[in-house]
């Protein structure tokens, strides 16, 4: 297989304007879609009682666990649920995804 892939193609980059166009055409629409994607679920989690929110957040995180942007949106909007102090320790919701760097 390496024998057939020995020629490298050059990709033309035309400065900052080209990078800006790539961002505006490819990246920005994706981020906007993610902001509106699962908006109803994110609002529901924020408006529920504190007793139910950890379970709802845990279920939502299992659904979006492979999308880092949505994972960040759910976690950043529900910091009070993720870092609820109980007895001096931090209690995480059940079935949640925790990424340690």
Image (spheres, rainbow, N blue to C red):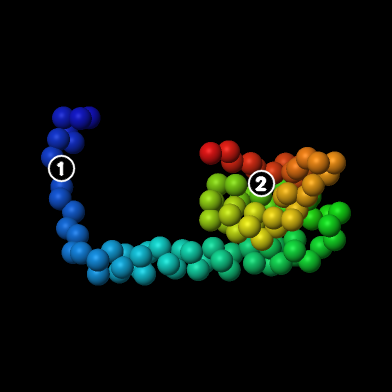
| Residues at marks 1 and 2, CA–CA distance in whole angstroms | 40 Å
Do labels 1 and 2 touch, CB within 8 Å? no
Q: What residue is rendered at 31% in x and 68% in y?
A: 20
The quadrant holding residue 11 is bottom left
Q: What residue is rendered at 79% in x and 55% in y?
A: 53
**x, y percent for residue 33:** 52, 66
Determine whether the residue tagged by mark 2 lies in a helix, strand or loop: helix
Name the residue beneath numbered marker 1: 8
Q: What residue is rendered at 81% in x and 63% in y?
A: 48
Determine whether the residue tagged by mark 1 lies in a helix, strand or loop: loop
Specify the farthest residue to the front.
Answer: 88
**x, y percent for residue 42:** 68, 63
Q: What residue is rendered at 16% in x and 30% in y?
A: 3
The quadrant holding residue 25 is bottom left
Q: Is residue 36 visible?
A: yes
Name the residue beneath numbered marker 2: 62
Specify the farthest residue to the left.
Answer: 7
98 w.r.t. 28: above or below: above
Q: How many marks?
A: 2
In this view, the residue in front, 15 or 60, is 15
Q: Is residue 86 left or right of residue 82?
A: right
Name the image quarter holding the N terminus. Answer: top left
**x, y percent for residue 97:** 65, 42
**x, y percent for residue 85:** 79, 47
């Amino acid at each position: 297989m390496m024998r057939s892939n020995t020629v490298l193609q050059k990709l033309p980059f035309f400065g900052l304007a080209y990078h800006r166009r790539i961002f505006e055409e490819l990246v920005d629409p994706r981020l906007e879609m993610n902001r509106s994607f699962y908006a109803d679920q994110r609002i529901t989690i924020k408006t529920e009682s504190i007793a139910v929110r950890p379970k709802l957040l845990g279920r939502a995180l299992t659904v979006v666990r492979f999308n880092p942007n949505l994972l960040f949106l759910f976690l950043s909007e529900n910091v009070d649920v993720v870092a609820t102090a109980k007895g001096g320790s931090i209690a995480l919701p059940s079935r949640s995804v925790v990424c340690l760097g």
